[in-house]
Amino acid sequence: MSQLEKACGACQACCVVLKIQTPQLRKKAGVPCPHLEQKGCGIYDNRPPVCRAFLCGWRLLPEQDASWRPDLSGVMLLRLAENQISKTYRAAGPGWVFVILDGEKAFTPRLGQFIAQMIKRRTAVFLSAMTPRIQINEQLEVSVAAGDIDGIVRILQQTHALLLPARAPSGFGRIWALYQAQVDRMRAIMEQRRK
Ligand code: SF4
Ligand code: SF4
């Protein structure tokens, strides 16, 4: 499905989820933009450049059909530029952040398969629960090599659950949740390597 065939329709995910810090528009992450109305952007014809330029992963990736639209699939993809990912993964192109908007909709075998394909190609893959992102390539390598899609989905759900407390706007709760998620990630990687 080409970029031209895709339209945001009823989706408003990026107008809520993203943090925007530009001279024309400032908003916090996870808070609806003040210009967002029930029907969509209230200043659409005059929306700032940052909004005009933004396309989520669903708009960019031809392999995602209409059912992957973020409000329908519960997951929004954000592209990361080369300078935002480690050199190890740059040969495979941009990195991708899977921002989980709705865990019940998002965590499906289809998502596991999609992420497995990216990991096989050595694309940098990150998970976010509308929180700071965490890279998950190493954590998923063994399950991807084994073709264990259920295992991939399980690890995604566990990591997502660890990240959720980091939605706290700031302070110790957020730092602790991110620390726990990193420790759990490293533990899972070490256990897989010992097997
Ligand atoms: S998240 Fe994607 S599909 Fe949804 S409104 Fe933003 S650009 Fe459009
Ligand atoms: S200005 Fe409009 S398009 Fe931009 S974030 Fe706000 S509601 Fe969305």
Image (cartoon, grey):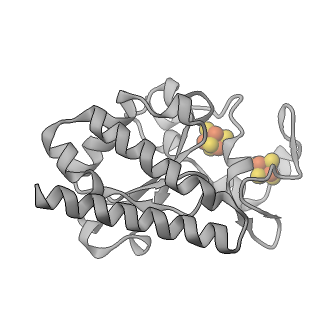
Q: Where on the picture, by quarter, is residue 22?
A: bottom right
- As drawn, 117 above or below 187: above
Residue 64, position in %: x, y?
42, 33
- Residue under the point 89% across and 52% down: 34
Nearest the camera: 74 or 12? 74
Nearest the camera: 168 or 83? 168
Nearest the camera: 184 or 82? 184
* Quadrant for the C terminus in the image: bottom left
Q: Where on the picture, by quarter, is residue 19?
A: bottom right
Residue 88, position in %: x, y?
24, 71
- Residue under the point 51% across and 24% down: 67
Nearest the camera: 162 or 128? 162
* Residue lying at the far top of the rendered structure: 67
- As drawn, 36 above or below 177: above
- Residue under the point 73% across and 53% down: 30
- As drawn, 98 above or below 71: below
* Residue lying at the far left of the rendered structure: 195
Left or right of 191 on screen, residue 41: right
Residue 147, position in %: x, y?
17, 36
